[in-house]
Amino acid sequence: MFKLFYADIKMLLRNKQALFWSLAFPLFFTIIFGFFFGGSNASVGTIGIVKESNTEIANGLEKTIESAGVFKIQNKDSVDEIKESMRKSQISAGLLIPEDFGNLSSEQGGQITIIEDPASAQVNSTLVGFLNTYLTQVDYKINNIKPTFSIIEEKSSDKTINYFDFVLIGLIGLALMNSSIMGLAIGMTKYREDQILKRITTTPLKTSKFITAEVLSRLLQNFLQVSIILLVAVLFFKAHVTGSYWLLYLFALIGAILFQMMGFMIASLVKSTSAAEGMAQTISIPMMFLAGVFFPIDALPHWLYSIVQFLPLAPLLRMLRAVALEAKTPFENPINILIVVGWIIVFFFIAMWKFRLAEE
């Protein structure tokens, strides 16, 4: 088994192109999301501002928008310039602060204009909400009114996390899933086409040892994947990992075993590399969007959530996020561990059964 393990490692290292893309694919995603959401970049989009008023209220509004960090600001000279920039996709919305804004003696002193792009619904709604909140506070101050209702914000955790941190863990799960399922499913069917599996089944080597050697060799690749993603995310995009790195690696590698077992199962059910690639993509692509890589799955309709929460990737991501973002251990909610282990056992026994009995 150990000789097969070393042989697998050599084969992985010799196939430099496949090794490069297995590492580069998740890294590209990490860099892209890092530029958008990493570090101190908390803005939802860029807006253009035409400021014609120099009143205290107008100046205060401009300073508040700049200091909030919700939007990136571009100063414009006219509404036409705003619309032209929106047409070129340089900004997502515009704000006109007219000459009389903030002049309480003028009938138009309380009106500002938002120029909206229908394609930027998130920026539009955020800008409207931001301005409504600010102007309501100004109204209360001018009229010396104390609000009747107020909000008290209480965080469930004192940990500092953002959307990039959430997606980062999803990208780790995505990397493990894609490389393990695609790599093993296609690799094993290639072995079949080259008659390698047929030769192996005629030797005393047990199927379980063959599978174990393949899994162990690919775990090194998975370890390298996770390490590169975390290194780039933490050093260059200031990602927050508040929990134990040891636990994060441990459960990430358990997840890698899960998807490798799935890869073996797929390889045992198809007869060609093209069929293996198609089946692997059919399984992994929907799971990428439904298991919580990019957004919380509790936002899905209840009937769909009740199904997708048991997909192999979903409990794995819940465990990894509990470790990385909340500094907890998955043992506090062992149901996720049971689901992952259950999937591993199912896939493992299907792979063993098919590899033993399939006609090669």
Image (cartoon, rainbow, N blue to C red):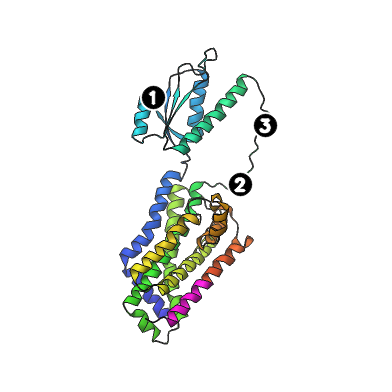
Task: Using a 10 Å C-alpha cutoff, classify the residue at mark 1 as few (fewer than 14 neighbours), some (14 to 19) or many (20 or more).
Answer: some
The amino acid type found where label 3 is placed reads Phe
The amino acid type found where label 2 is placed reads Asp
Task: Give the overall secondary structure of the magenta segment.
Answer: helix
| Of callouts 2 and 1, the N-terminal one | 1
Give the answer, above or below, for where 248 lies relative to 158.
below
Tag 3 residue: 149
Q: Label 1's element?
A: helix
- Position of residue 228 measured from the top left corner of the image (x, y, whole percent): 42, 58
Q: Label 3's element?
A: loop
Quadrant occupied by the N terminus = bottom left
- Position of residue 101 measured from the top left corner of the image (x, y, whole percent): 49, 18
Tag 2 residue: 158
Tag 1 residue: 79
- Position of residue 336 measured from the top left corner of the image (x, y, whole percent): 58, 62
Number of the label disc, if any, that sits on residue 148:
none
The amino acid type found where label 1 is placed reads Val
Per the image, is 133 magenta? no
